[in-house]
Amino acid sequence: MDKTDKPARVSPRGAATRSALLKAAAQVFRTVGFAKAGVSEVVSVAGASVGSLYHHFTGKADLYIALYEEFQHRQQERTHQAVRDARAEGESDPTRLMNIAAHAYLLGCIEERETARLFFSGDGPPGFDYQLRSRLTQWTDRNVALFRKADEPVDEALLIVVSGSMLLAVAEVVRRDDADAHRLADDITGLLTELEPRNRLRN
């Protein structure tokens, strides 16, 4: 979107319809998968019309991406809140703060297991896997920044290891029952705290 563009105003009724369509899409995608889902099923569950769906979205791929964006926003809120709480309690160690952020991200995936599975199952729109990896890498980059000082370069190897680990970790925790998922989340984030940027190790 061009920076001069203003977001379109949405009426309360329009917002309610959009919300109903997203809720219905999530239900349909969870039940039959993205590939097998149809627009007609979504509008039927939502009690809406095909025209209203195309007023708010370009199609089922757009619905899927919108669901992911909402999920990612909730995940960002969870991780930011976890780090804020830790800092308020006096935590300043960058390794611990990154561990706390990663742990909060995994706990959010466990809490929203059915939703997280939609995005980490491999059954999404064409190109979504790349977008998922890119977004998780961006999220990881912000947290890896906790490791370094302002004048230090990004350790790309560390970024790849952490983002790759988180991608695999999410795929695993959402497949397990609560106790096993929480134990695995603890173990994985515990291992992440042992990582250090290479430039820090050389000093």
Image (cartoon, rainbow, N blue to C red):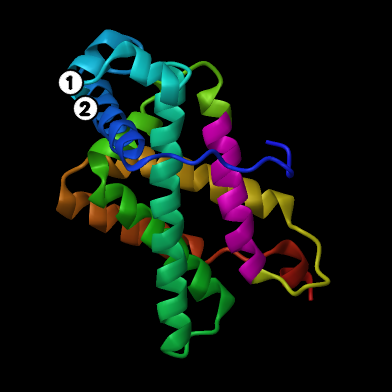
Span colored in magenta:
131-146
* Residue linked to disc 1: 45
- Graded by Cα atoms within 10 Å as few (under 14), some (14 to 19) or many (20 or more), the crowding at tag 2 reads some
Q: Determine if residue 105 is in view.
A: yes
Query: Would residue 168 be found to the left or right of residue 180 on screen?
Result: right
- Which label lies toward us, 2 or 1? 1
- Please tell me which residue lies in front, 130 or 195: 130
* Position of residue 112 measured from the top left corner of the image (x, y, whole percent): 26, 46
The local secondary structure at tag 2 comes to helix
- Please tell me which residue lies in front, 200 or 175: 175
At horizontal 78% and vertical 70% (from top left) the residue drawn is 202
Which residue extends farthest bottom? 90
Q: Which label is found at residue 27? A: 2
* Position of residue 39 measured from the top left corner of the image (x, y, whole percent): 32, 12
Quarter of the image for residue 144 reads bottom right
- Please tell me which residue lies in front, 178 or 139: 139
At horizontal 77% and vertical 66% (from top left) the residue drawn is 199
Q: How much space separates mark 2 and mark 1, taking CA atoms?
A: 8 Å
Q: Main secondary structure of the magenta part?
A: helix
Query: With respect to residue 36, does 132 lie above or below?
Result: below
